[in-house]
Amino acid sequence: MDEISLTLPADDAFRRVAHLVLGGLAVRLDLTYESLEDMELAVDTLLERTPDEQDVTVLVRVEGDELRTIVGPVGAEVVHELGEEAGDGIGIRRILETVSDRIEVSDARVHLLRRINAGQ
């Protein structure tokens, strides 16, 4: 099992660091550019809604043919919105469901799971 863990301030300026790490992993796993963009969109969506005064950890783990991205801790409003059904608008749940195969929330951390195949 491969795993990368990155803890950074939830400040906008540090999102580029997360993108660099995700990009390196995508190259190593031979993921398509579209898959990389989906990963970045999911992480950005969560980081944008994390209070600036706290650090956030982005953990990416490869488990067989599944990529698990864990982001947290996230704010209570994110946990609440993910617990509700997606409405007609474009909210956190709708974005994350579009770019992930499965979403789980545990201890103020959001787990995004996506099947991967080389060249995908």
Image (cartoon, rainbow, N blue to C red):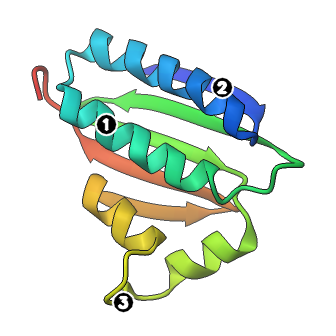
The answer to which of marks 1 and 2 sits earlier in the sequence is: 2
**Foreground of the two, 20 or 61:** 20
Q: Nearer the viewer, mark 3 or mark 2?
A: 3
Could you tell me how far apart the alpha carbons at marks 1 and 3 are, in whole angstroms?
24 Å
Q: Residue at x 51, y 54 (%)?
A: 45
Residue at the image point whose x is 49% and y is 31% from the top: 60
Is 72 rendered above or below residue 30? below
Q: Amino acid at mark 2?
A: Leu
Name the secondary structure under disc 2.
Answer: strand
Amino acid residing under circle 1: Glu
**Gap between marks 1 and 2 measured at Cα:** 18 Å
Which of the labelled discs sits on residue 87, or is there none? Answer: 3
Q: Amino acid at mark 3?
A: Gly
What secondary structure is marked by label 1? helix
Res 54 seen here? yes
Give residue 64's quadrant in the image. Answer: top left
In the drawing, does residue 26 fall left or right of residue 112?
A: left
**Badge 1 density bin: few <14, some 14–19, many ≥20, Cα 10 Å:** some
The mark lying in front, picked from 1 and 2, is 1
66 displayed left or right of 53: left
Rendering quarter of residue 75: bottom right
Placement of the C terminus among the 4 image quadrants:
top left
Q: Earlier in the sequence, mark 1 or mark 3?
A: 1
Q: Could you tell which of marks 3 and 2 lies nearer the N-terminus?
A: 2
Q: Position of residue 92 (x, y in %)?
A: 47, 69
Is the residue 40 above or below the residue 41 in the image? Answer: above
Q: For label 2, count other residues whose C-alpha is less than 10 Å away and answer few (under 14), some (14-19) or many (20+).
A: few
**CA distance separating discs 3 and 2:** 32 Å
Quadrant holding the N terminus: top left
Residue 106 is drawn in which quadrant? Answer: bottom right
Residue 55 spot, x, y in % from top left = 81, 40
Label 3: which secondary element: loop
